[in-house]
Structure formats: structure tokens, C-alpha cells
Image: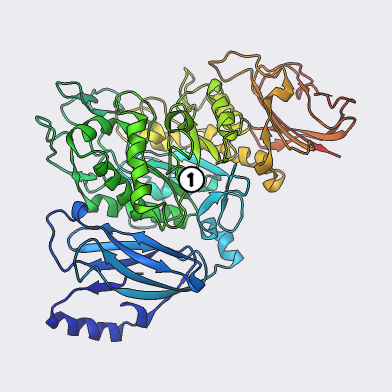
Amino acid sequence: MIFRLRGLKKHLQLILFVVSVILPGTFGEVFAKTYQVYEKIEITLYAARSYDNPYKEVEVWVDLEGPLSVFRKRCYGFWDGGDIFRIRVMAPTSGKWEWRSGSNQPDSGLNGKKGSFTASPWSEAQKQENPCRRGMIKASANGHAFEYADGTPFFLLGDTWWSTATFRYRWYDDDKQRPIGPGAGFKDYVKFRRKQGFNCIAMIAAFPNWANDDKPATLKTADGTVLRSAWKQLGTNSAKNMTDEDGNRAFFFPGKVPGYENYFPDVDRINPKYFRNMDRKIDYLNSQGIVPFIEVSRRDIGQAWKKHYQWPQSYTRYIQYIWSRYQANICLFSPIHLDWTGATISADEWNQAANKVIEKYGPPPFGTPAGTNSNPSTLRNFGHVDKAKWLTFHQIGNKRTHDLYPYLTEIFNTSPPVPGINGEPYYAGMLGAPGGTETSELYCRSGMYGSVLSGGLGGHIYGAGGWDGGMWGGNVEDVADNHIWDVIKWQSADQMQHLRAFILSEGSRYQALVPSVNLLSPNRSGKANSCIGWAYCLQAREKDFFLLYFEKDCPVATLYGSRPNARYEARWFNPRTGEWLDREVLVADAEGKIALPNFPGDLTKSEVDWGLKLKSL
């Protein structure tokens, strides 16, 4: 919805009046329109004054109020080029909504405009068609998992398409279906993942300092300031090109770094054209029931940004620009992609900039959750919610073996509790296991099940491609291995849907389970820096429900902590196929100890990985 409210001269005011009569519903409160709850509504204002740099100089907002004043918040907008400013809102509840605009400038085109609209609920059938209609993602009642606004569990199953906004995930305006191959585009890849059960795509909004040029992938100034630290393309030493389909980058050039004006952008001058193209992809993801996890930037931009621009204010402004632009989409937010703490500024400095967003603008008005990719965990890098005021869920990542997963148990035990996920685990194709092989799939499953059963009840994000790209690098060059259209078909991704089937096999009960690996003995027979030989356990506090997972090479184990003398139904689960094997009954002894059965095939040592579910009878 666009309310066209422009400070016009008298000869244009007549045109506006005539058009508003002909097209009722277009120009504000008199002709209010009905929308659905959680549907993005766009209010467009036109500045009456000129500004040298609207991105830096102008803050615009609407004060939005819902029925019976159940919602009353200030919703900030953003500059979208020329004299255009937009504020994107939604209605979290049905009924009549009213808004009134304002800004930090004495501008008649931006201040004092008002309007209204009415929201009605989606039907259950419409929600089934597109789960994004269930509303914004939020924490479950106990804080450990995710759910939609209507209370339906949201178990995150994501993929890492960091370069989503670029030409590497090609946008076609038409809806023609193209086979997964060199001619495929963004929509084709989205539909492919949707059929596999994925409901989240993790992306980095912009890589404005990356380009194919005559400079190395890792580029520094004479004093050692990092301008970029990028993935290399196979066969060349230059960085990947990260423009959109029209050649736009997120900020304009030249920049302000002396001697490198054409290699590091002017981060005080944003390019709305880039983000208008990105809008299409974000909206399309939501239309397919998929939640984008939007990280605003990657850590290698930090040193030059801090040294040559006003810090933290300029980075705070950029975070707020992205967050306000997508606050009315069903999504997740992140202020920085901190996959490595080298070649960047400190986590404390990133945290300072992100905290100022909350201090100045408040939390995202419609409750968008915020976390971030981190190494080894957001808790270790940024602290808990008392120190990271912007953070509403935790994340681990970037260590590729199972010794990373205990960080999720540490997160699970924080107070107050927030959801946790593994956002960048083992990638298919790493650790000497070529992508598409059974070994690589085995390591991926270790990341999936080991992370969730260690306390990552929010869900899991998958990745594939190795160091030369794949899905996350967005490889489309002829010189590169692991093209998108090949990597997306690896079986390891298809097995993500079995993780959901295992965890949600008893509906939402998983949300109340507690990581309890010490109830299994033995539980760590393998090496720390590997993905084999460890076992995991989730337990219901009532001791009537257990989920267990055994990596390859685990010996038969004993389970402690069950109900004394209780009988349990036990079923093995095949994480490669999603198949449940025949039930058997196990009986605990007087101390609550259960001798678990041999692995399928009557093996005393697992030759492959297995899941196991126990329910009391």
C-alpha cells in the first residue's frame, strides 16, 4: 500500500485532488483500505525540501496506533532515492490502524501527514498455504525455541546463501520455471529448497567493498588497515564481484580512504537502487513461506569503516537503515556477520554500534528477532542480553567439528533463556570430504543433530560448498568448482527435512526438552576435532521422553535418569532416509538406568549414525 503524500505546489494540488477522487484508497485516511494482519504496508512520503545527503540528514517516522491502543509505537522509515521516503509497517492484530508522520527536519512533505487502514485475519487455510501469514517469529513461552506469532512452532531449517542480494542469485521478472542448471535463477533455487522443507535463507545484505579488480582478495592499506578479506575465486587472486544484477553496490564510490578511493566505498552515501533490487528477493522469500535472516554486513569492512568514518554513529545508521527497510517483512535481523574475529574490529566495537540502534530507535517495532553469526558463539563474543541489548537469540558457528556444539548447551543455560541455533556449522565439502559424498553427508548430520540435541532448539542452518564457494559463495563462474546448480542438489541438504521429522515427532514437546548428554555413558568415544564417536541426549524434565543421537563409531550406551522400573517404547530413526524402525520395549531398573539395545543390524558399535526416541508407556 502506498499513500502518496507530497508537498506540492498549487498547480499539482488540483491533480492530486482529482486523482484521489478517481482512485479512492490511494491517498490516506479518507479512503482507507483493508489489508491482512502481518502484511507489509508501505507509506510513501515526498520531501518538500532538498538535502545534500538525505541518508545522513533525515530521519522520518510514523507514529502507529492499533485498535484500543493495544499497539502504539514509533516506526522509522528510510530514504529511497530522490525526494522519496518510505515507512513500512504491518498490523499485528485485526481492526483499524492509524498513523501520523514526523521527521527530524522542518519539512512539510514529511511531517503531519496521516492516514488509516483496516486489517483482517488470515484464514487457517491461507496460513497453511504460506506460514509467514502466521506472523513474526518470536521465542517460545520458555524462551528456548522459536514459534510464529500465532503460537505455531517454527523450527528453523536454513541454508547459507550469503550473496543472495547479488547477481549470483539471478533475478528473473517472469515466473517461468527453469531447470536447476546454469540458466536457473533465484526463484528456481527458492522453490527447490522449499520442497525440501527449508524455511529460512541466511544472507548478508551487502559486500560493498568486494569486486573483481586488479587487487588481491585480501586488501590492506600501507598501515595495515584491512579494506577487505574476501573469498578467493578458483584460479584468480582477486575478490568475488558482489554487485547486483544491474551492477549496483550498496554504497557509492569514490570512498574516503586515501589512495583507495575506488576500492572502499563511501559508507556515508548509500545507494537505494541496490536495496530496491534486494527488496524483490526478500518479498519473494516471504511469498514462498521462507524467512530471510538478514545480516547487514560482513566483519571485514570494520577496520576501514571505523578509521575513516564517524564510529559508531555511521554504522548504527546503516544497521537502522536495513532494519527499518525490512521491519515489516517476516524475517530475522543481524547487525554484523562476525564469522572470524581476525581482520576486523573487536566484538565490543560492533556491539557498541548495535546497542546504539536500540538506545536511539528502540527495538524493531514489530518484534523482529535479532542474533548474529559468530565465532565461536554470540554469548562468548557479545555477552548475554544485558550486554547485547539488541540480541534476542544466540548463535554458534564457524568451527566445523563437534567440539563446537557444547557452546549451545552453555547458551541453553543462560538466564533469561533465549533460543539458540548453529548458524554456520560444518559445510558439505570441508574436512577433506568432497561434497556430495557419504562422508560429507555424515559430517553434515553430525552438525544437524549434534547441535540441536546440545540445546540448539531454535533450529539449524545448513551450508555447502567448501572454500571455493558453492551455495554460500554463490559460484557461477566457469572457472569455479561447486557451482550453485550442482551444490544445491547434494543429498546432505535433502536430509535436513529428516531432522525436523525427528525433532517434531511429538509435536511441540521438543521445546521443553533439556540437553542432558551426561545421562549417556559413554558419550564421547571419538576425538574432539571430528564429527564421529560422540553421542547426545535431550530429556523431558518429567523423564518420560528422550531424544538421542549417536554419531558413527559410537559404542552401545547406557541411559541414566529415567523413571525407576518404568517401561519405554524405543524406536530407532534413520537420519539418512527419515525412516522409523520397528518399536521395542525397554525397562529401566530400580535406579532409572536403561541398557540401550544394540544398533540396528545387532551391532555393538555404530557403523553409521542413528537417532533414538524413548517414550514412557
Q: Residue at x 37, y 60 (%)?
A: 75
Quick one: 455 or 183, which is closer to the camera? 455
**Residue 19 picture quarter:** bottom left
Find numbered disc 1 in the image and state the secondary structure of the residue it sits on: strand
| Residue denoted by label 1 | 200
Left or right of residue 434: residue 305: left
Q: Residue at x 43, y 69 (%)?
A: 65
Point out the image quarter for the C terminus. Answer: top right
Left or right of residue 290: residue 311: left
Quick one: 435 or 3, which is closer to the camera? 3
The coloring applied to the image is: rainbow
The x, y position of residue 407, in whole percent, is: 54, 27
Residue 474 visible in this rendered orientation of the protein: no
The x, y position of residue 353, in whole percent, is: 32, 40
Q: Residue at x 15, y 27 (%)?
A: 214
Is 86 above or below relative to 414? below
**Residue 537 picture quarter:** top right
